[in-house]
Image: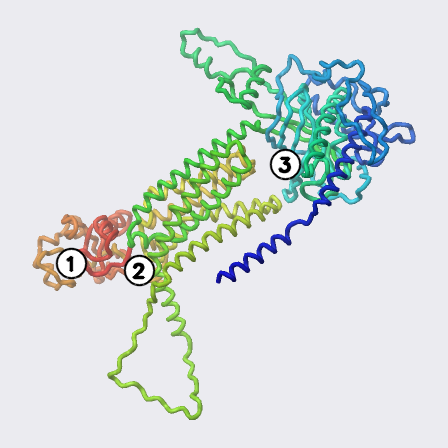
Amino acid sequence: MADHNRFGFIVMLMIIYLLLPYSTPVTRRDEAEQAIRNAKRQLHELQNSTYGVPGNITGLEGVGKPDANGTVRRIPPESVRKTVAEMIRDVLGNSANDFTSGAEMGTLAPSELAYPLPTRNNYEGPNDSIDISPLPSPDGATEAHLLRRDIPILENTDPIYHNASGGMYGEWQRAYDLEPYQLTNSTNVEKNITGNHGRLLIRVEESKPGSVQEVEARISIENEDRFTSHDIIMYGAHLVGTGEMVLTTTSREFNGLFALPHFARTKEAFEDIRQLWNESLTEAIRRQENSPDLNPLLTQKPEFGSPHQCEYIAYLQLHPIHSPPPAPIPYPTYDPRFWFHYLWDPEPITSDVLREIEQELRHPTGAPLPPAPPIIVSSVIYSPNCGYVLQSNEAKGLKIEMFHSKVQNFALSASFLVGVQIWLLIRQMNESSTPSTVSRVSFWSILIMAIVDGYIAGAFILVSALVESSYLALLTAAFLSLVLVIIFGMRFLMLIWGIQRPERRAAENAAAAAAAADAPPTAQPAPPGTPLELPAPATAQTPLINTEGTNNNAPQDLSSVYYRFWFALLGGAFLFLHVASWPPPHRHIFVTTFTFLASSFWVPQVYRNVMRGCRKAFSWEYILGTSACRLVPVLYLMCYSDNIFMYEGEWKVGVGVVAWVALQVGVMWVQEVAGPRVFVPGNILPPAYDYHPILPIDDLEAAQPFSSTSSTDTPSPSSSSQQPSSLHHHARTGLRSFDCAICMHPVDVLTSSPPNSGGGGSGASGSGGGSGGGLSSAGGFGGLTTRRSYMVTPCRHVFHAPCLEGWMRFRLQCPICRNQLPPL
């Protein structure tokens, strides 16, 4: 066995080794050196280029070259620049004239550069050394100018965020189409956007604080049909003074990263971005020279998808934060209303207040500041090689620090809900601590809840790895979810499975016996020459056949359930990972279906109540508390649009799930009050004993009144008349009183008229349990509540329902005659 396991382990290691990507150290070193040479060459071209004349950096055919009229064809075209200018003017209003009235990128001559930079030596070839040191100060530019970049700052206007790190989502529209540029090294383009509108999600992350900041953005563009979604990674710069961001994609065909300064709208922005890009790219090249790992920015390999795809240039404009000016408080200081307005009126957001808010978010000190306002951004996204322009107005979101705080609050709330479920499950396990009570519980109801809790624990672990700032809070929720599943959920499942094992084996034996009885007998002819066997004598003993089986495989049975549970959980996790790659409409259908299935945890219990004729499997504390705790996440995801997952749910689905769970709870309440088989035809169900029958009025001796002198199981017809103190005629017609043998108090029992009086009673057999029609007091809600107040055993002894239910929690024997009782 050990050799076999060792062989399987070796085979598995060989398969993993064969599946690993093959890349020799020599190949990686050559690729890194080639990437460094290309980056130096492109940086050299950027340093020697002039505003509006990018040269051959972009990789687009015809860009940077004069046409027949002598005009240099530049990127982006004039129509796109006008669209961007109009967007900025709409966002900033009159303040936009301060920096849009200057020279914008157009058909400018190379001599119109704001500060002509000193050129480097001409680049001769891949073996030529390139000076990548920072550029010297241009003539006429002071050090203060280089630090401040001379970017127009919006004065006397509403403040704008200096750091736009966060997530925003909104809607996009297709503005217009243009003639596409042709990439030099590519002909086929994939992942083209053909829709007219859809949903847009922008995630921005900034670094290197200053007047010009590096930006990395992930933009998800989803079509209106929701069947196609495009994920884009863009790099760019944020001009802090104006709130404008310029971003671009980069690949081996489109060198947008090195051509980014030429996409700026003004000459001043071009100089600032080029100076920042020279420093950043020089540092990246030096890190690449000292590191064996490949830098994806320098190698320009796409992280996912096809390398031949639409390239993008994006312009994002942050919206100013509009806040009303402070209004005077028209109350004196001794008036309580003055202090109410003084404490609760919103404080105007000025530039100084916004800077303090950003500082507090990044380095919390507990300063009393107003909450951070949301980030609002408008955008224009242009694809040069696919030839279309997309526009988005007022995509709204939260600062990254506010989002992390929101995630932390969500994790703490989830931890509280999971803790409540643990407490409820512990109390329910204490209630269902005997074989009688455990036999009522549905194994599948607990299994559904345990599987869902396992998925929730895995989701918390995954999110904790992605959101590092809320790691502890998310890990706490994941730990409590695992405790709920592994310690308490699995323990309860094992207990239910072990106690209900005889029931399952009896059902399997009955099914096997029925199949054997239905099979026709087949007689095998005896071979020639075989002597005939005589029948056994009448005195011969019949061999005993053990139909119950042995319990030797009980541990294996429990372990198989344990392993199947975890394999099912693992298989579902792989299914969810596969579903993540589906189109959004298919994902939505899957999430909706899974939500309804995961919320059907009471359906197996309803089915078990009907099939076994049992009630009160769970306490109402557990039913209502568990239902509420499991509905809160569904309502949060489906009905709250600002959820941390940015999932666009439908409130109708949330309301439908609530109604579905409420229907299940209502059915269980009706089963407890009116009987587990109410509204279900009895001829299609297996027989089950009814502890709440209506006794026939002409055969009351079938119910044995308690007597210390009587020890017979079946009373004689005269036993009732010999003990008049134990059987009383109630003042109300249709009720008779007996003595409960447990509490020694009277118990009222419903009776029915004999058949010849028009009653048609059901008798006391207990199999039907339906009330007769002879007495009006036996029907209606009053009759149902009266029947639920007493219980009649198969041996015809009468008790109070709470008394016998409490007794049967520990023993399934009659308190009087010790006969076996069927479980509730």
User: What residue is drawn where x is 31% and y is 87%?
Assistant: 535
Image location of residue 226, percent across then percent down: 63, 42
Along the polypeptide, which appears first: circle 3 or circle 1?
Answer: 3
Reply above or below: 419 against 154.
below
Is any atom of residue 776 visible in this view?
A: no
Amino acid under disc 3 = Arg
Given this view, does label 3 or label 2 mark the residue nearer the observer?
3
Q: Marks 3/2: CA distance?
A: 57 Å
Residue 64, position as x, y percentages in the image: 84, 30
How far across and down, in percent of the image, does residue 637 sit? 51, 38
Residue 355 can be seen, yes or no: yes
Report the Cα–Cα distance between label 1 and label 2: 22 Å
- Between tags 3 and 1, which lies in front? 3
Classify mark 2: residues with Cα within 10 Å, few (<14), some (14-19) or many (20+).
many
- Answer above or below: position of 379 versus 661: above
Pointer 3 with pointer 1, Cβ within 8 A: no
The front one of 314 and 625 is: 314
Which numbered disc, 3 or 2, marks the residue that appears first in the sequence? 3
Could you say where residue 814 lies in the image, as x and y percent from the top left? 20, 57
The residue indicated by pointer 1 is 704
**Based on the displayed image, in which of its 4 quarters is residue 43 positioned?**
top right
